[in-house]
Amino acid sequence: MRDKGYVSEERVERAESDAKARQAGCDSARAQVREAEARIGASRADMARTVEVEVAFDDPGGARHLLVGYSADVEIILARRDNVLRIPTAALLPGSRVLLLGADGALAERRVETGLANWEYSEIRSGLARGDRVVTSLERSGVKAGVRAAAEAGTAAAAGK
């Protein structure tokens, strides 16, 4: 129609721009659908890994005061390792790092590789040696790499079994 002069060049360009914009909108919608499908797939995979567990009380008589609908925290042990180097989990800094009290009295930061862990202890696969003095009072003001410190009597946490 443009070649025959029925529509202006401006109108042709506007129609082409509109068509490209609508095509971009369709492409975006298709990408959103693929993303949503991927999220659904991930959710289904997570649901498939969910373990429904029935537990029994060691002492059923101690549970007689519990009411229907109460919830309970249950620790499920999936793996166990004996004779490994471990530290209190609370001593871990973000990024798998710890603070150590060096022989010179200065705190030093060190990256570690962790293994099995629970709320209480974390296995240390590398980065520490048995007997290294790990800082556990990370919440105290001024506790950071480079400062001088001293272990309090009876509270020194050494990496160990």
Image (spheres, rainbow, N blue to C red):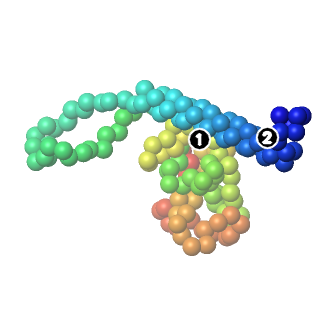
Measure the alpha-carbon separation of dots 2 and 1: 58 Å
Looking at the image, residue 60 sits to the left or right of residue 35; the answer is left
Relative image position of residue 15 (x, y in whole percent): 76, 42
Q: Which residue is mark 1?
A: 114
Looking at the image, residue 115 sits to the left or right of residue 120; the answer is right
Nearer the observer, 1 or 130: 1
Relative image position of residue 140 (x, y in whole percent): 54, 70
Relative image position of residue 113 (x, y in whole percent): 63, 41
Residue 62 visible, this angle: no
Q: Are marks 2 and 1 in contact (CB under 8 Å)?
A: no
Tell me which corner region of the image, top left, top right, bottom left or bottom right, holds residue 58: top left
Q: Spot the residue most to the right.
A: 3
Residue that appears at 68% across and 64% down: 145
**Label of residue 16 in the image:** 2
Residue 101 visible, this angle: yes
| Vertical placement of residue 89 versus 29, above or below | below
Assess disc 1: are there few (<14), some (14-19) or many (≥20) residues with their C-alpha within 10 Å of its C-alpha.
some
Q: Nearer the viewer, mark 2 or mark 1?
A: 2
Residue that appears at 57% across and 59% down: 135
Quadrant position of the N terminus in the picture: top right
| Sequence-first disc among 2 and 1 | 2
Looking at the image, residue 101 sits to the left or right of residue 1; the answer is left
Tell me which corner region of the image, top left, top right, bottom left or bottom right, holds residue 22: top right
Nearer the observer, 151 or 88: 88
Instruction: Give amino acid for label 2.
Output: Glu
SS label for mark 1: strand
Relative image position of residue 119 (x, y in whole percent): 44, 47
